[in-house]
Image: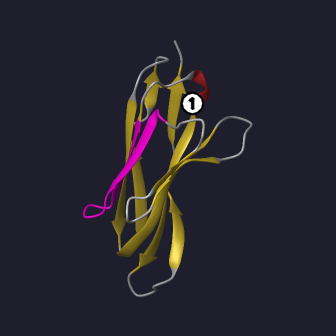
Amino acid sequence: QVQLVESGGGLVQPGGSLRFSCAASGSIFGINAMGWYRQAPGKQRELVAAITRGDRTNYADSVKGRFTIARDNAKNILYLQMNSLKSEDTAVYYCNANLMIIGTMLPIDYWGQGTQVTVSS
């Protein structure tokens, strides 16, 4: 079994900051790319930021310069630092990991449970 457990969401005022973490645990052989996605009410889930095992990053245009993704490969933890938050950042945020389970060697996408972020004054 593999679990991705997120923490760090909540309510913040415009211009504020939040930091997410996502811890992967279980029978993990290795983790390839990891990323953060979000889904606002009435909208499709979209990629926010992604990071390869070698720390190459990719960001949605809407968050470039404000959000920073990072990972700790030794601990299997993914982070997202969100600064200068705007009301349009309000959404449920999901972490994603493409990983291989011990004994299978087939890469599979796993998702966290989702964490609500509300940016409002």
The picture places residue 48, in percent across and down from the top left corner, at: 55, 45
- Kindly identify the residue that appears in the image at 47 percent across and 17 percent down: 13
Segment tinted magenta in the rendering: 65-81
Q: Can I make out residue 112 in this image?
A: no
The vertical placement of 77 against 40, above or below, is below
Residue in the foreground of this view, choosing between 38 and 69: 69
Q: Quadrant of the N terminus?
A: bottom left
Residue 71 inside the magenta-drawn segment:
yes
The vertical placement of 8 against 76, above or below, is above
Q: Can I make out residue 96 in this image?
A: yes
Q: Identify residue for label 1.
A: 89
The picture places residue 32, in percent across and down from the top left corner, at: 44, 69
Label 1 secondary element: helix
The picture places residue 118, in percent across and down from the top left corner, at: 53, 26
Taken as a whole, is the magenta stretch helix, strand or loop?
A: strand
- Amino acid identity at mark 1: Asp
How many marks can you see?
A: 1
Most extreme residue toward the right, as rendered?
Answer: 42
Tell me if 48 is positioned left or right of 21 in this view: right
Instruction: Rate crowding at label 1 as few (under 14), some (14 to 19) or many (20 or more) other CA atoms within 10 Å.
Output: many
Tell me if 74 is positioned left or right of 113 in this view: left
The vertical placement of 44 against 27, above or below, is above
- Kindly identify the residue that appears in the image at 51 percent across and 82 percent down: 106
Which of the 4 image quadrants contains residue 41?
top right
The picture places residue 59, in percent across and down from the top left corner, at: 53, 46
Most extreme residue toward the left, as rendered?
Answer: 74
Which of the 4 image quadrants contains residue 52?
bottom left
Tell me if 56 is positioned left or right of 111 in this view: left
- Kindly identify the residue that appears in the image at 36 percent across and 50 percent down: 70
Most extreme residue toward the bottom, as rendered?
Answer: 103
Residue 15 inside the magenta-drawn segment:
no
The vertical placement of 12 against 95, above or below, is above
